Image: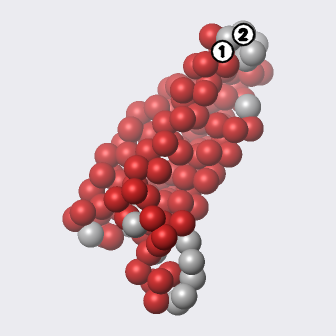
Amino acid sequence: MALPVGLITVGILHSNNTRDIETDTAADATTLPALIGRALSVKLYYVEVTLPYIWMITICVAGIAPWWALLCLLSLPLAIKNIKVMMLYKQGINAYAHVDEATAQLQLAFSVLLIIGLLIS
């Protein structure tokens, strides 16, 4: 159960580093988004935010986790909203400046719903 939550945590940090590519590069800070570029970095964010849902469905179908754990899927609209915001990266930094905060909110919602589901089961 740690992998999905961990991936969303990585998404928080990754979205922050994606937003800060220019300032990090100017400060000689080497980050993954600075190395791979903004377009690929945004695609990686999609994976970090969607894979937790695929993972949870897979482990529930496989019988590893209880079906109630899928309560975390109720946070999927937040993930979709964040992905849509990240897709605005070509419009400039201001278009997605707060996606790291929104991803933290996603992590909270996903985690709380997952915990509730596990407690119910």
State the quadrant of the C terminus: top right
Q: Is residue 14 left or right of residue 85?
A: right
Q: Is residue 100 left or right of residue 77?
A: right
Q: Is residue 103 or residue 59 the one in the foreground?
A: 59
Indicate the position of residue 47 as horizontal and vertical percent values.
Answer: 49, 42
Q: The residue under label 2 is which amino acid type?
A: Gly
Residue annotated with mark 2: 63
Q: Residues within 10 Å of mark 2 (few under 14, many from 20)?
A: few
Q: In this view, does 72 lie above or below 80?
A: above
Residue annotated with mark 1: 60
Q: What residue lies at 63% left-to-right and 10% top-to-bottom?
A: 61
Q: The residue under label 1 is which amino acid type?
A: Cys
Color style of the picture: secondary structure
Q: Is residue 41 or residue 111 the one in the foreground?
A: 41
- Please say whether residue 17 is visible from this viewpoint: no
Indicate the position of residue 48 as horizontal and vertical percent values.
Answer: 53, 45
Q: What residue lies at 34% left-to-right and 59% top-to-bottom?
A: 39
- Please say whether residue 13 is visible from this viewpoint: yes
State the quadrant of the N terminus: top right
Separation of marks 2 and 1 at Cα, in angstroms: 5 Å
Q: Residues within 10 Å of mark 1 (few under 14, many from 20)?
A: some
SS class, disc 1: helix
Q: In this view, does 31 lie above or below 86?
A: below
Residues at marks 2 and 1 touching, judged by CB atoms closer than 8 Å: yes
